Amino acid sequence: MKVLKFGGTSVGSPENMRAVMDLVTDGEQKIVVLSAMSGTTNSLVEISNYLKKKNKDTARIFIGNLEENYKKVVAELFTSEENKKKGLKIIKDVFQTIKSFTSGTFSEVGENTILAQGEIISTNLVTLLMNENGHDTKLLPALDFMKIDEDKAADLNYIREHIKPVIKEVGDAKYYITQGFICRDADGEINNLQRGGSDYTASLIGAAVDADEIQIWTDIDGFHNNDPRFVDNTKKIDQLSYNEAAELAFFGAKILHPQTVLPARVQNIPVRLKNTMNPTDDGTLITAESDGRGIKAVAAKDDITAIKIRSGRMLNAYGFLSKIFKIFADFRTPIDMISTSEVAVSLTIDDTRNLESIKEELDNFGTVIIDQDMTIVCIVGDIIQEEHGFASKVFNALDGIPIRMISYGGSRHNISILVPTERKKETLQALSDNLLNGL
């Protein structure tokens, strides 16, 4: 069995939904994970924000507009009057749920419930569409088996234990449709895996059912060796190792959710990135093996804040770094990069919600300097296999570009540099011209 995931653009219109149906109905049993139709989650976030501000009248207007849009989708999507009525019933039930939060107090549970409705709509409509066209299809409610724990990490053991009974309960089918992104938390309340979480859902399901392959379908052919939004003449990468793909996803390659690789790697399940607009292309295959080509790609992660702590107390001291790291742990703020010297430590974060409080704590240890509007640029590959002089190639390519930090040697798969965001495009193009062209 394969697990296939299709994002919001892939199901963003009745025409695209039919295209997805044609792609998956090849006679081979599979589980299909769907996102909400493109734009829906943004609309639901907007509705939730109005409800948080107690602007219920405006929220009702947005709810009404979105409901009317979905009624038009139903009218275009289905052929028979019976299925059009069933489609409208789906829409009516979902929007009754959303409208129920326009009275009374509005909580985080209400917000998460509203955000879940986009995936609930898309999966119900596509399931109905496939059955209308004679394809044996059943809906697997993700809220019956997808769960996160107290730390908001996916509970793979729970998912593995519960998905198979859910499949058994809904009955045998050639095709199963389920929701991406949404789940329940440790208290049983509706929650989610954050933006892009449908990729992660597909990987978790694939690991839970021991899938033969996990396919992530998007609107591009796979990983490119640089960001085509900023760099000319990028090339598709045919194969990556799990580690290489994880580095690229974490450091800004938007095609894949950063956590997607881990469940697949644990179960040694291949992950393939495919393009719904070009389905005959093989895409990018991600496995345990690297093809040994050295430098593979460059990715960039924006909205980075650099923090430097200078203190003479670091000199020949022990335990200093652990005290620094404890501050970030206490505020549940992950660190991306780190660089140390005898009297200073520099690090980066991308979550600045507690920045002021963190700085207040760090001020007790020395002088704190904060630089915002920074970008991490990550050069990824099986770097150990690269010829000598790799680092010098990188720095020669970046001659004239101010580098705030360097991380090299912590992983055999990447070297990361920190540059001002205003120099990001220049940095990516320079690396492409000097390191990637010809690969």
Image (spheres, grey):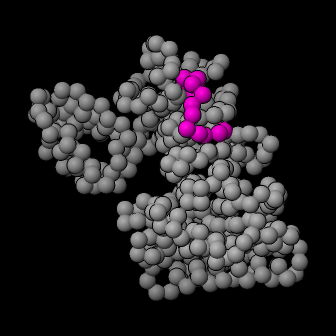
Q: Which of the 4 image quarters holds residue 229?
A: top right
Q: Quadrant of the N terminus?
A: bottom right
**Percent x, y of residue 132:** 84, 73
**On screen, residue 45 above or below 365:** below
Q: Is residue 227 visible?
A: no
Comparing 61 with 302, the one in front is: 302
Is 234 contained in the magenta span?
no
Q: Residue furthest toward the right?
A: 80
Comparing 384 with 91, the one in front is: 384
Q: Which residues are magenta?
A: 284-297
Q: Residue furthest toward the bottom?
A: 104
Which residue is depicted at the point 48% across and 60% down? 156
**On screen, residue 74 above or below 307:** below
Q: Quadrant of the C terminus?
A: top right
**Percent x, y of residue 411:** 41, 31
**Percent x, y of residue 82:** 85, 82
Comparing 55 with 160, the one in front is: 160
Which residue is depicted at the point 62% across and 45% down? 271
Comparing 111 with 218, the one in front is: 218
**Percent x, y of residue 136:** 80, 70
Which residue is depicted at the point 52% across and 46% down? 265
